[in-house]
Image: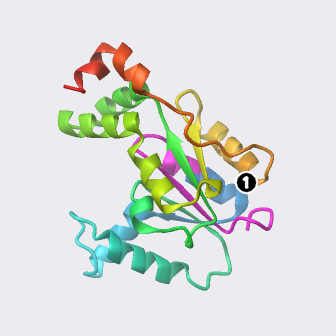
Amino acid sequence: MVDGEYALIGITGNPATGKKSVASLLSRKFGLDLIDLNSFAKLHSAKGNINESNVNTVLLGKELRDYLVGRTRGAIVSGHLLPSVLSEIDLDIVIVLRCSPERLLDRYRNRGYSKKKIKENIIAEAIGVISSAVLKCFEMPKVAEIDTSKTNPAEVAQVISSILKGKTEKKVGLIDWLPTMIKNKDLRSLLH
């Protein structure tokens, strides 16, 4: 538990927003287990429960809930599938990492993403698909959004730590990338 309040923490966001790095730092800082949803899904696909190429989020959620039940130690669950897998009763808090589409465009190109995958992920971030999905599953008091565009993972982990300790207010709905999408020629071309 973190300060006696948070035992199960969710960290989600689009690819390349910093989920793995931040979750790893926080798990070490607070002594919490780290559950990466992609790795968890692959582990369970090896058991024949989940098709690795097309994740059955209902089955993955059941497997994960079974794994989390009765735990005496807290955990951080990290992955972009989080709002499709877990619900309000499963987590104490959900952190949504957001990042400027300009930064993500560079990161996706560096990762060798296809043009289609870049477009899908940039548009999803620009319109807040994951934030919206989280807010459909979790009450607003349990959710915080953090802009990771100009910070490193250690700084983001510090902000989350401050939120968990009640020193920093949780904020949701203040990030708007649409003006960035319109101003940037490369990003604007993805809208067509």
Residue 112 seen in render: no
| Magenta run includes residue 137 | no
The residue lying toward the viewer, choosing from 50 and 138, is 138
Please tell me in which quadrant of the rendered image residue 6 appears: bottom right
Q: Amino acid at mark 1?
A: Leu
**Residue beneath disc 1:** 164
Question: Measured from the top left, where is residue 121 in percent x and y?
Answer: 31, 40
Quadrant assignment for the C terminus: top left
Q: Is residue 166 left or right of residue 179?
A: right
Question: Measured from the top left, where is residue 175 in percent x and y?
Answer: 53, 33
Magenta stretch, residue numbers? 1-22
Question: Measured from the top left, where is residue 14 in percent x and y?
Answer: 41, 44
The residue lying toward the viewer, choosing from 109 and 115, is 115
Q: Is residue 188 left or right of residue 29?
A: left
Q: Is residue 94 left or right of residue 180?
A: right
Residue 132 seen in render: yes
The residue lying toward the viewer, choosing from 43 and 186, is 186
Above-or-below relation of 114 to 65 = above
Above-or-below relation of 100 to 138 = above
What residue appears at the point 71 percent right and 60 percent down from the top-left corner?
30
Secondary element type, mark 1: helix
What residue appears at the point 37 percent right and 14 percent down from the top-left corner?
183
What residue appears at the point 46 percent right and 57 percent down from the top-left corner?
136
